[in-house]
Image (cartoon, rainbow, N blue to C red):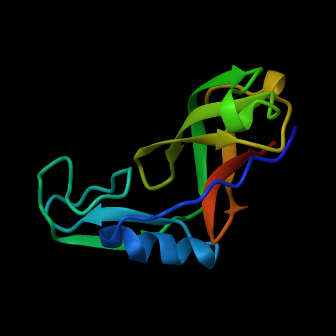
């Protein structure tokens, strides 16, 4: 499997804390102090209760594959990257995260399989991906 192309990433100023943590290899998961729920994707308000009282907690680093699709051919800058896996991973913290599963045989993946967090370089920042666990 080829490595992903490095594209310029310009984070939104309100998510600076999230992106700065990625530089250290840390995935922060937003947690609402109003309703007590963790959620994904990073944003400045809770999508469940609309509170802006949030905490940013380091992820435990694990999850399970909720659903996935294998893409055998990429397009644009990803034309030479394939096959690759797009997956919804249910984080140990609860929310579903749209991400990639890397470093494994795409044909051997299964729903419910355990995965572990891998932070991959993407220029100045790192992006969360997951690796299958036995």
Vertical side of 10 occupied by 72: above or below: above
Q: Quadrant of residue 93?
A: bottom left
Q: Is residue 78 left or right of residue 90?
A: right
Task: Please tell me which residue lies in front, 118 or 121.
Answer: 121
Residue at image location 71% in from the left, 22% down from the top: 71
Vertical side of 3 occupied by 1: above or below: above
Which percent across, then down, holds residue 31? 30, 64
Vertical side of 40 occupied by 98: above or below: above
Quadrant the C terminus occupies: top right
Residue at image location 34% in from the left, 72% down from the top: 13
Residue at image location 83% in from the left, 44% down from the top: 103
Which percent across, then down, holds residue 118? 70, 58
Q: Quadrant of residue 30?
A: bottom left
Task: Please tell me which residue lies in front, 6 or 131.
Answer: 6
Quadrant the N terminus occupies: top right
Q: Is residue 133 left or right of residue 95?
A: right
Which percent across, then down, holds residue 37? 27, 56
Task: Please tell me which residue lies in front, 16 or 96.
Answer: 16
Residue at image location 18% in from the left, 47% down from the top: 48
Which percent across, then down, holds residue 70? 71, 22
The total of numbered circles placed on residues is: 0
Q: Is residue 39 left or right of residue 20?
A: left
């Amino acid at each position: 499997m080829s490595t992903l192309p490095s594209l310029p990433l310009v984070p939104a100023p309100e998510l600076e804390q999230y992106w700065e943590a990625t530089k250290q290899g840390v995935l922060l998961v937003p947690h609402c102090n109003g309703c007590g729920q963790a959620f994904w994707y990073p944003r400045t308000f809770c999508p469940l209760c609309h509170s802006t009282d949030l905490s940013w907690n380091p992820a435990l680093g694990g999850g399970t594959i909720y659903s996935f699709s294998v893409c055998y051919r990429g397009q644009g800058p990803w034309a030479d990257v394939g096959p690759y896996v797009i997956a919804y991973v249910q984080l140990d913290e609860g929310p579903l995260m749209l991400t990639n599963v890397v470093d494994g045989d795409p044909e051997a993946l299964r729903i419910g399989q355990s995965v572990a967090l891998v932070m991959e370089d993407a220029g100045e920042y790192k992006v969360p991906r997951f690796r299958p666990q036995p």
